[in-house]
Image (cartoon, rainbow, N blue to C red):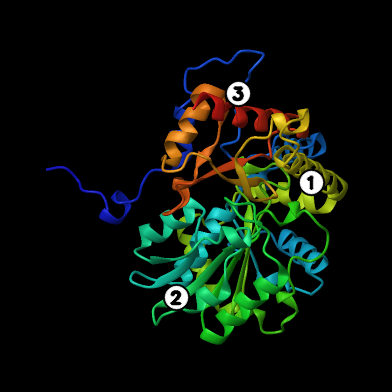
Amino acid sequence: MQIRPNPLLSAVAAPPIAEAQGWIAGRTFPADRPLIDLAQAVPGYPPPPPLTDHLARLVAEPATARYTEIEGLDPLRSALAADIGAVYGAPVPAERVIVTAGCNQAFCLATMALAGSGDEVILPLPYYFNHQMWLDMLGIRAVHLPFRPDRGGVPDPETAAGLIGPRTRAIVLVTPNNPTGAVYPPDVIADFYQLAKARGVALILDETYRDFLPEDGPPHALFADPDWGGTLVHLYSFSKTYCLTGYRVGALVCGPELGAEVAKAMDCVAICAPRIGQEAALYGLRALGDWRRDNRETMRRRLAALHEAFAPGDPGGDRGSNRPGYELVSAGAYFAYLRHPFAGRPAREVARRLAAEQNLLCLPGSMFGPDQEDYLRLAFANVPAEAMPAVASRLADSLKAS
């Protein structure tokens, strides 16, 4: 008799990135048409040498191999609290910060602390697939908030209000969004916050990409509310900011009651976030302010180049000849969301053909939830600005090949 896995996990599809990578496995690409990989959201540059040199010195210290406090290193919690205060213009106590093994774990711990099997969480479409996967694993029902391409991918609070029921425990927002790149305006975030507060549910606000906003200024003013801890659960990641994806370090910021429950779960699943990642994040906050700002500007230039590549031109002139024929629905931070021009054709088929025929790897919208067959996600963060015209040109070529 064979062992039987948990049926909740068995029913969850495998992570989709590996599937997309399989479309190009074993292939070689010519020098005049190299692979452009737009599939996975990873920085296109390494951590700075001062950071890696700092970590190399720390590895020799015995303390680096030991546990930290469950909630994370106190200096890191204080440094992140100060950083949040500077970005959002409102003080946040260090004891409200819990350091996690990446932002994925922050989401997992938050939802585990908020909801149980049979409860509901409102999840906007298209969703970050790991969020859906985790809720399914816990037996929590994801109630999908419809995608609004007419709003540039920004979800509608009024529609969300109609989805709240007696089992609703939280509303999830990701801004800047993965997969759409949409940046939610402060007034929309405020409306969701007031809705959640009035209805007694949590607002889980995943701001993994807030260091790559296209404009300066606070993303929202929620921390200015003295009672924010009763509603807001703020998630953050150091992974993209300091190129630490493999070090697994993120954070969760919440009220003390929820924080106590999160710490229980953390003690069981990891005891603490990896110490070396915490040390890296602390060094980044203390010493890499200029480097962080330079990378923000790099991403802004890539975003501007992407918009230029998709801008309409004179159809009879050179400027219009390479425009791709794909609609740019939304873009920001690391991502762009496109409506492909092949009506009725599954998004996976479109994406696979782009990989096979154009050496352009991206993800189909169908990997991010139902009713997304008309869309593709481009993760452009690891593509230099000067390569954006080639992305548009290859998309245009796909129309000729269809």
Q: Nearer the viewer, residue 342 or 294?
A: 342
x then y, percent, for residue 381:
69, 40
Task: Quote the CA–CA distance across marks 3 and 1.
Answer: 23 Å
Q: Secondary structure at mark 3?
A: loop
Query: Do tag 3 and tag 2 residues touch (Cβ < 8 Å)?
Result: no
Q: Residues within 10 Å of mark 1 (few under 14, many from 20)?
A: many
Task: Quote the CA–CA distance across marks 2 and 1.
Answer: 35 Å
Q: Amino acid at mark 2?
A: Leu
What residue do we see at 69% from left, 27% from top?
390
Determine which residue is flagged by label 2: 163
Sequence-wise, the earlier of marks 3 and 2 is: 3
Sequence-wise, the earlier of marks 3 and 1 is: 3
Q: Which quadrant of the figure has residue 77? A: bottom right
Residue that extends furthest to the bottom in the rendered view of this protein: 198
Residue 87 horizontal side relative to residue 365, left or right: right
Q: Secondary structure at mark 1?
A: helix
Q: Amino acid at mark 1?
A: Arg
x then y, percent, for residue 396:
61, 30
Q: Nearer the viewer, residue 59 or 3?
A: 3
Determine which residue is flagged by label 3: 35
Q: Nearer the viewer, residue 208 or 238?
A: 208
Sequence-wise, the earlier of marks 2 and 1 is: 2
The answer to whether residue 380 shows anywhere in this view is yes
Residue 74 horizontal side relative to residue 341, left or right: right
Residue 339 horizontal side relative to residue 350, left or right: right
